[in-house]
Image (cartoon, grey):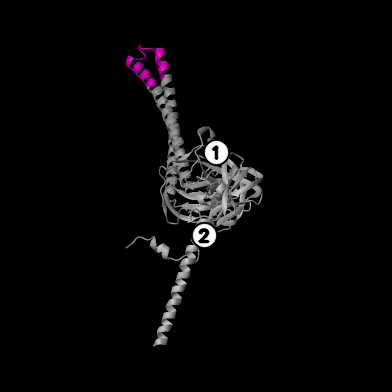
Amino acid sequence: MKILFSQKTMAWRIIAAIAAITVVSGLLWLWLAKENGAANFRLAAVTRGDLEVTVSATGTVQPEELVDVGAQVAGKIVAFGLDVDGKPVDYGSVVKAGMVLARIDDAVYSAEVSQATAQLAQARANVQRAQADLGQFKAKLFQAENDWLRAKQLGPSEALSQSDFDAAKAAYEVARANLNVGEAALRQAKEAVAQAEASLRKAKQNLDYTTIRSPVHGVIIDRRVNIGQTVVASLNAPSLFLIAKDLKRLQIWVPVNEADIGNIRVGQPVSFTVDAFPQETFVGQVGKIRLNATMTQNVVTYTVEVTFDNSDGRLIPYLTANVKFLVETRPDVLLVPNAALRWRPQPEQIAAAWRPDKKGGQPYRGSGALAGAPSQPTAPDQKKSRDQGTLWVPEGSLVRPLPVQVGASDGNLTEIRGEDISDGLQVVIASGSGDGSSDTVASPFTPKLFKDKRRPAH
């Protein structure tokens, strides 16, 4: 029993000793970190290279020439035509101008052609009848005119009574009026023929519209009807097929924000990528800037047309393109990650000579001042202030500021200029001191006891 008791006592003493060592080690580490200001900084080197300033946007690949083929008559789709390969036209079919794309049931329109043909024949027969009637009227007028001339020579006398004289005159006037009627009837009959001919042409044209033909050489990128489907053409022609005239001539329609449109110009170099070929970068140029701006959720954008060579036919319509417009190229300049210009230390991380304390140190007053001591440039100095930045370089276990002139940026790297700046200079981009600007580097010996004390009591 004594041996068992002594073993338990020894085990508890060992556990207590380990716990005490852990607590003391953690407290010692925290004290040393506080006294020395020793924070773990993440560094990056200043590099020299070429900087490309770009404007990024997302657009859609569009056919340069697109033809929407519709139906001008109503009816049921009864058949599709054949493409260049002899197969029924479908998505992706290659067609030539004049090829049959689809046929609409033509029973009604064939009947209308037959009816118009019969009406035309009737109208032509009416012309012949009017011509015959006109001949009769001319003959009657000739006879009536001669009778009237003889009556005028004799006059009312014993040889010609007054009633016969009046009858001859009346017959002449009637014959002349009938001739005018006959001439009008002939003109009317001829106009009826012209109207019948127009009706026949219309009926034939409607019959021809039942055969949908391709107006251009191209590729069908959308088929919007099926066999048996009825199309109704009223005020608007229903769309049946969408044909891209030449898939080797594509363009990208890119909506560009009004804040960036000033940096876009016709002929400007452009590079872009598509998700279909993520490892490749394609090139093009700005072809046109459309002036009809659009507003979506109070954001004004302008559509920019980007042209490029697709002679290999790899890109297809409606791909999403991630576009970069090349605004400016800065060759052989010093570059630094943007994170280095954004990072700001805590006062205790700054070397004593630059720390804004009460011990007579030289407080730093640069662009982006220290926490707790902001620097506010005046209005005339605002542009100059925007061109200034601050880098932080290690000085022992602390950091010191390094003022720089800030140039162009591509979103990841920024051009810098200034004294004491050289290729390979190490600058701070993040801190591990727990100031919230980066990941905190914690001691592996720090006990969880302190974290539990910061939790609210339940």
**In magenta segment, residue 76:** no
- Percent across and percent down for residue 390 are 57, 45
- Percent across and percent down for residue 258 are 50, 39
- Percent across and percent down for residue 22 are 47, 69
Q: Bin the neighbour count of mark 2 within 10 Å (Cα to Cα): few under 14, some 14-19, many 20 and up.
A: few
Q: Is residue 90 visible?
A: no
Determine the image quadrant of residue 72.
top left
| Residue occupying image coordinates x 42% and y 77% | 12
Given residues 5 and 413, the one toward you in this image is: 5
Q: Residue furthest bottom?
A: 1
| Residue occupying image coordinates x 42% and y 31% | 188
**In magenta segment, residue 171:** yes
Residue at label 2?
32
Disc 1 marks a residue whose amino acid type is Ser
Given residues 116 and 144, the one toward you in this image is: 116
- Distance from disc 1 to disc 2, alpha carbons, whole Å, reads 38 Å
Residue at label 1?
385
**In the displayed structure, would residue 35 be above or below residue 6?**
above
**Quadrant that contains the N terminus:** bottom left
| Residue occupying image coordinates x 41% and y 81% | 8
Given residues 141 and 385, the one toward you in this image is: 385
- Residue interval drawn in magenta: 147-173
Q: Earlier in the sequence, mark 1 or mark 2?
A: 2
- Is there CB contact under 8 Å for labels 1 and 2? no
Q: Bin the neighbour count of mark 1 within 10 Å (Cα to Cα): few under 14, some 14-19, many 20 and up.
A: some
